Image (cartoon, rainbow, N blue to C red):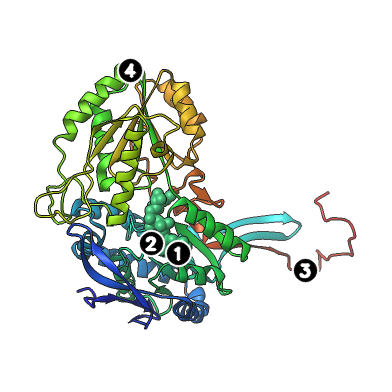
């Protein structure tokens, strides 16, 4: 299947591509710095149309047996695999992610589709027989109605796949508002869902920015909002959605620390830090952006080994498979990353490897930042407190594991973390006591698999439930508990004025 090649990326409403007369904004190819397309910026009117389509589709879809809903997901998975090259090309062109990294993103997304294929099992409910004389009781999981997802630029395929397959197999209908910075691969998913047999109106995509988001948050027919993005926006989404009576989960930003203990396997530390800090240009909410070395001896060895290995890293255009990572998303974002590197230097840190003037030959106008290593970072520095979201690894030096853990527990974010050690007792103590939602032990990117659930603590998540997996089923359904007795000649209720008990 070929993708939409219109110059303006529009919306997908009620099973059809539509373009309205709304405003547009440019979409860049970050590898070249050129504008590749425009994206329509939908507002309240477009959201109204999408919600109306989803609302109209809900009664039929709600009644569709979960097995039939799941069969569409099986077909969708097949189409995702058949069209993987095109999806990765679209991700690369607008996000800048190199093709093997885009393939990894797609694969992690497909795993969520596979989990959603288990809908009949996941929605079975809970049954208790004989809770009282001739009384049975059971819980059912009902869809909410029209639900919405708002997603970030950094995983334009995987994060939408965290949301809509599960919401849809649970019997909801969906309005998705992707990132306006790389909208095409997300829109393509909706076209593939239609090809897989999804009835019109069940999945709708509206492109846009704040106006579209606010229209979702205020719409009386939207029952729940699932959000992934930066912390200030996540907090805004959560407070506004819940004030408007909607269920909400809002996942925010991160600052993920790795503790490097003196007994760590140094080769493993260096290899995994390279990928986890610089992969996808550091534009991952699970990127390891801080290494906390316990003791100067391991710190010095780690830095020497990192510097040597960083000299061999290759970055450049998304289309070159030999690159390790690509550009960052926009010129503004590059300026922000560079600003953090410069502020670290001004505030007293040592920039050992400086990627600020990086420009691969032939791609001088691309939004590139080279891999950067900063030593001597302290917790009062603004570059330490902020989420940089670029290929920048900061090193802090402490003398004890307790100090390292205190740093992590004091940080406003609590998304992911990792400890490198050979000491099982230390690792277990760390996992038990660290105030972070996803913990790795010698695993740099502890992203839970699709049948677990994903989320952070502290200001990395607003709401109660994690994303996808079992928590995803709970988020996109509401429980109804039915208690039943059929009166018979033997069992008849007499008037009771005290709270019924078994006695
Ligand atoms: P962002 O917060 O700028 O945008 C996310 C979404 O919110 C987009 O759809 C955008 O259109 C919308 N938005 C932006 N500004 C808005 C405003 N003022 N009002 C209403 N809506 C607005 O995030 P981003 O830059 O696209 O993505 C990167 C961020 O997402 C990072 O902070 C990263 O850590 C985070 N992220 C978190 C997770 C996680 O699971 N916790 C996963 C991926 C990304």
Q: Label 3: few (<14), some or many (≥20) within 10 Å?
A: few
Provide residue 18's location: percent of width, then percent of height: 34, 82
Instruction: Please identify, in this view, whether the residue under mark 4 or under mark 2 is nearer the observer.
Output: 4
Provide residue 328's location: percent of width, then percent of height: 26, 52
| Depth order, front residue of 468/296 | 296
Q: CA distance from mark 2 to mark 1?
A: 7 Å
Give the mark nearest the N terminus, 4 or 3. 4
Compared with 351, 74 (above or below) is below
- SS under mark 2: helix
Provide residue 385's location: percent of width, then percent of height: 44, 39
Residue wearing tag 2? 160
- Answer with the quarter of the image where residue 70 lies: bottom left
Q: CA distance from mark 4 to mark 3?
A: 77 Å
State yes or no: discs 4 and 2 in contact (Cβ < 8 Å): no
Compared with 135, 420 (above or below) is above
Q: Label 1: few (<14), some or many (≥20) within 10 Å?
A: many
Instruction: Please identify, in this view, whether the residue under mark 3 or under mark 2 is nearer the observer.
Output: 2
Instruction: Please identify, in this view, whether the residue under mark 4 or under mark 1 is nearer the observer.
Output: 4
Residue 296's tag is: 4
Give the mark nearest the N terminus, 4 or 1. 1
Residue wearing tag 3? 487
Give the mark nearest the N terminus, 3 or 2. 2
State yes or no: discs 2 and 1 in contact (Cβ < 8 Å): yes
Q: Label 2: few (<14), some or many (≥20) within 10 Å?
A: many
Q: For the residue with label 1, is its CB less than 8 Å from the closest atom of ligand 1?
A: no
Q: CA distance from mark 4 to mark 2?
A: 43 Å
Residue in the image at 51% along x and 74% along y = 62
Residue wearing tag 1? 149
Residue in the image at 28% along x and 76% along y = 8
Q: CA distance from mark 4 to mark 1?
A: 46 Å
Residue 118 visible in this rendered orientation of the protein: no
């Amino acid at each position: 299947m070929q993708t939409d090649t219109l110059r303006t990326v529009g919306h997908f409403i009620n099973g059809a591509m539509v373009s309205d007369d709304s405003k547009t904004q440019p979409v860049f190819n970050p590898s070249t710095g050129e504008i590749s397309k425009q994206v329509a910026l939908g507002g309240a009117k477009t959201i109204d149309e999408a919600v109306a389509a989803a609302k109209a589709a809900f009664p039929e879809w709600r009644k569709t047996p979960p097995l039939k809903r799941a069969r569409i997901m099986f077909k969708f998975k097949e189409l995702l695999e058949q069209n993987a090259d095109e999806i990765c090309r679209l991700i690369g062109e607008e996000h800048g992610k190199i093709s093997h990294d885009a393939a990894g993103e797609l694969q992690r997304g497909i795993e969520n589709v596979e989990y959603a294929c288990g809908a009949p099992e996941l929605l079975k409910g809970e049954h208790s027989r004989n809770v009282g004389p001739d009384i049975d009781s059971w819980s059912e999981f009902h869809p909410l109605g029209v639900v919405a997802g708002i997603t970030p630029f950094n995983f334009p395929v995987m994060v939408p796949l965290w949301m809509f397959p599960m919401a849809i197999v649970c019997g909801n209908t969906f309005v998705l508002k992707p990132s306006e910075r790389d909208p095409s691969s997300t829109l393509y998913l909706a076209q593939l869902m239609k090809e897989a047999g999804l009835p019109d109106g069940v999945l709708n995509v509206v492109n846009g920015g704040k106006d579209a988001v606010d229209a979702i948050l205020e719409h009386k027919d939207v029952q729940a909002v699932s959000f992934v993005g930066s912390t200030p926006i996540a907090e805004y989404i959560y407070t506004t959605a819940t004030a408007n009576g909607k269920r909400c989960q809002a996942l925010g930003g991160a600052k993920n620390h790795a503790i490097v203990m003196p007994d760590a396997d140094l080769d493993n530390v260096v290899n995994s830090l390279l990928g986890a800090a610089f992969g996808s240009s550091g534009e991952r909410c699970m990127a390891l952006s801080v290494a906390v070395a316990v003791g100067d001896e391991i710190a010095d060895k780690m830095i020497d080994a990192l510097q040597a290995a960083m000299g061999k890293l290759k970055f450049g255009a998304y289309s070159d498979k030999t690159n390790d990572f690509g550009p960052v998303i926009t010129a503004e974002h590059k300026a922000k990353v560079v600003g953090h590197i410069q502020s670290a230097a001004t505030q007293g840190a040592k920039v050992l490897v400086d990627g600020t003037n990086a420009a691969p030959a032939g791609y001088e106008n691309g939004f590139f930042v080279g891999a950067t290593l900063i030593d001597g970072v302290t917790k009062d520095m603004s570059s330490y407190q902020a989420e940089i979201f670029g290929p920048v690894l900061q090193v802090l030096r402490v003398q004890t594991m307790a100090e390292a853990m205190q740093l992590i527990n004091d940080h406003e974010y609590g998304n992911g973390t990792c400890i490198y050690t050979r000491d099982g007792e230390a690792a277990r103590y760390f996992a038990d006591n660290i105030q972070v939602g996803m913990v790795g032990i010698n695993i740099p990117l502890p992203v839970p698999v699709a049948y677990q659930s994903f989320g952070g603590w502290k200001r990395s998540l607003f709401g109660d439930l994690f994303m996808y997996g079992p928590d995803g089923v709970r988020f996109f359904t509401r429980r109804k508990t039915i208690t039943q007795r059929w009166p018979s000649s033997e069992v008849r209720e007499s008037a009771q004025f005290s709270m019924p008990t078994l006695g």
